[in-house]
Amino acid sequence: MSLIDAEGASISILNGTRTPGLAAEAAATLEEAGLTNIHPNNANEIYTRTRLIDYTGNPHTVAYLTELLQIDPNNVYARYDVSSFYDIVILLGQDREPGAQAEQDQDLEEQTPEPSPTLATSPTSATSPTPATSPTPGPYP
């Protein structure tokens, strides 16, 4: 028996977008991966980002779902509430809609600054030579 099976978490997937059937598609993905006790439905509001909330402490299932559904770990929350009807609730956001990844990639390209020009010196320059390449900047948030 796997640790995920041992946790036996009930999972609610709520469509927080205007795209019909998104929760059902995500539920099918989870079922194909071997998970059971999945309950798709619609959320009461629209969400920009997909969120996962763990109400009863299921670290192995949460880690698996986060990876399987590619949920940003910054949008994974633990809120202990044993009276919750479901152990885990996934709120699908607009970042899960078709074409959303292409839009996010485009936004990232627009935010990435152009490399600054490098200074080249002539061999007869009196100053010390400047490297022809500049260091690569670190990742952008």
Image: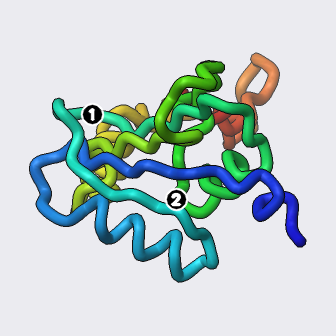
Please indicate, yes or no, whether residue 111 appears anywhere in the rendered image: yes
Residue 116: give x, y in percent of width and height.
49, 30
Image-quadrant location for residue 36: bottom right
Residue 17: give x, y in percent of width and height.
18, 46
Q: Secondary structure at mark 2?
A: loop
Residue beneath the point at 53% across and 82% down? 32
In this view, 90 is above or below 119: below
Badge 2: few (under 14), some or many (20 or more) residues near its Cα, within 10 Å?
some
Please indicate, yes or no, whether residue 119 appears anywhere in the rendered image: no
Colour scheme used in the picture? rainbow
Residue beneath the point at 65% across and 20% down? 80
Amino acid type at image mark 2:
Leu
Amino acid type at image mark 1:
Thr
Residue 60: give x, y in percent of width and height.
79, 50
Badge 1: few (under 14), some or many (20 or more) residues near its Cα, within 10 Å?
few
Task: Tell me the residue that label 1 is attached to.
Answer: 48
Task: Tell me the residue that label 2 is attached to.
Answer: 69
